[in-house]
Image (tube, rainbow, N blue to C red):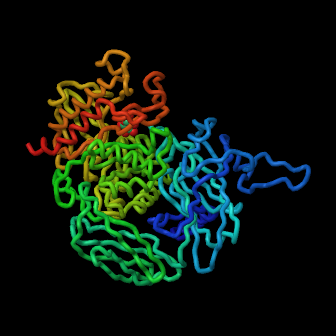
Amino acid sequence: MNLLKTIAICFLINFTLLPYAYADLAMTNVYGRDVVSLNGQWDAIIDPTGIGDWRKVWEERKPAKKTDFFEYSFDGGPSLTVPGSFNTQLPEITFLEGTVWYKKTFTAQPSKHKRLFLHFGGVNYQATVYLNGNKIGDHEGGFTPFQFEITDTIRNGENTVIVKADNRRLKDGLPGLGYDWFNYGGITRDVHLVKTNRSFIEDYSIQLKSHSLDEVEGWVKVVGDKPSQTVEIVIPELNISHRAKTNDKGLAKVNFKSEFDLWSPQNPRLYQVIIKTETDTVSETIGFRSIEVSGTKILLNGESIFLKGVNIHEENPLTAAKAVSEADARLLLTWAKDLGCNIVRLAHYPHNEYMAKLADEMGLMVWVELPVYQQIEFSAPGMKEKMDLMLTEMIRRDRNRSSVVIWSLSNETYDFTPQRNEMLAEIAKTTKRLDDTRLITSVINNQGYDNNTVNVWDTLYRHFDILSINEYLGWYVPWQGKPEDTKWKLSINNKPVFISEFGGEALYGSNFGPKDEAAYWSEEYQERIYKDQVKMFANTPNLVGVAPWLLVDYRSLGRMHPVYQQGWNRKGLLSDKGERKKAWHVMKTYFDNVENSLLK
Ligand code: GCB
């Protein structure tokens, strides 16, 4: 009976999975490979009703006889810049949550000694990819990379890739139906044609062993027809040349010691690291540092550190569009530096790869987050697999960035959501299994507030290294007493506490009504909130850091006030033009002095 059942299940799985080609996990460090960029202008068909599937747009049929016609064509239509969101390129689709078909023609010279891959940094939210009229696979998730091997399907000469990008919200999506940011759709990140040898280095982890300041413990994964190879890790500036052997699965463990000049925000030291095998060489700059929790403190390189954070969305307010480039990343991170930050929380989904790379160079720690946001459907069929896959994609891309110190696995989920507690506990374990060198957290916002006492009753955070709390005292929740007298009840009292969001809205230069009334969006009202929050922080137990919500005003269609918001969440310390609001200065002064006040 059992055997029969197993056979039946296998048949079912095979039967349902066979025609379904899912994207492969992307190789790490795509920018360090032999690549041709497929960025630039792509032809587009706008398909708000989704009829393109029925018309088989990817077949690109052209009239062959006088009576033929086809009700679609890439010729003569609009073109869109990749990377970029379609919403911000054609005014008529500003609010589209639906399908756009993209087409790009490129040339290739396949050789039997090489393998070729189409690599996408990110397509929001679902992507279906066709090469020369044939489907090569799908990907779900708007913020993580994926790839397809096209070695055997690519043609010598001209090739056409067509991508169906669909940013419709899904009830069982990550995120789900509701979220407080703009749903930028399309091919929003770089696209590359990658050429590798038949056997190549697919992935590696070169980081300090957890709790160590001088020992690298990592691995290198080789894939291809020659999995057993000698691997060499070379760090010229440290005179390191470490050799290891891969096993028959292509995996080599790497372990060596050195005296590293450790990476930190004050000293963002990076080393050139070269990974060589008999068939491949990849190189990039990597920093070495340790991050750990000791009691209620966070230690960077063994020393207690206060996390001076700020929240950032992946948007350039000056262009009112998705942040897609290194220049966009530099703008946002420079502002964070100017504020006096040593960490940025990249909310609420993995941002583009430039952010963590640049943070490595600029000396900013980074918090990376999964888009497990508010009311997502933990109990939906397949949700666990979806979360695990996205987590894997996220960690795989950024695991060699010294700047990345925290994996955040969710934001503001609710304990009454079925399966929430079980799933988040499970994913916490999976994350540690995939990477035990970083801290993990899940953000809580369901605390009570009564009698000027904040009651953090949700014990979800027992599974995590840091208790991260979003609280909007002074904005969504009026103060019940003097901020400095606020009391705290923590259901678990032996973990570091991080205030991951706080703040309120203000329109830069607002000069409309009474300054002490929230409904006029004045800078003074926002400034007051910040002054009060800072007073409260002085007496918040186990506090290891804070991050205002947020660096700069950003677009969010749910923010509908016609005078003050106009589709923008105005909680920025900077306006959408980059102007400093009064609250900016409160925060800047706090960050400039917080270490001294903690020493008292
Ligand atoms: C929150 C959410 C964040 C929102 C913010 C707000 O608690 O985590 O995504 O955008 O509040 O502005 O209300």
Q: Is 48 or 241 nearer to us in this picture?
A: 241
Give the answer, above or below, for where 63 lies relative to 316: below
Residue 529 coordinates in the image, percent (x, y): 26, 28
Q: Report the label total.
A: 0
Q: Where, by quadrant of the figure, is residue 491 drawn?
A: top left
Give the answer, above or below, for where 91 lies relative to 514: below
Q: Is 40 or 130 nearer to us in this picture?
A: 40
Q: Where, by quadrant of the figure, is residue 180 drawn?
A: top left
Which residue occupies the extreme left position in the image? 600
Residue 439 coordinates in the image, percent (x, y): 28, 56
Residue at (20, 47) in percent of width and height: 544
Residue 576 coordinates in the image, percent (x, y): 42, 34
Q: Is residue 365 visible?
A: yes
Quadrant of the displayed image that contains ligand 1: top left
Q: Is residue 424 visible?
A: no
Residue at (25, 37) in percent of width and height: 587
Residue 75 coordinates in the image, percent (x, y): 74, 50
Q: Is residue 344 left or right of residue 16?
A: left
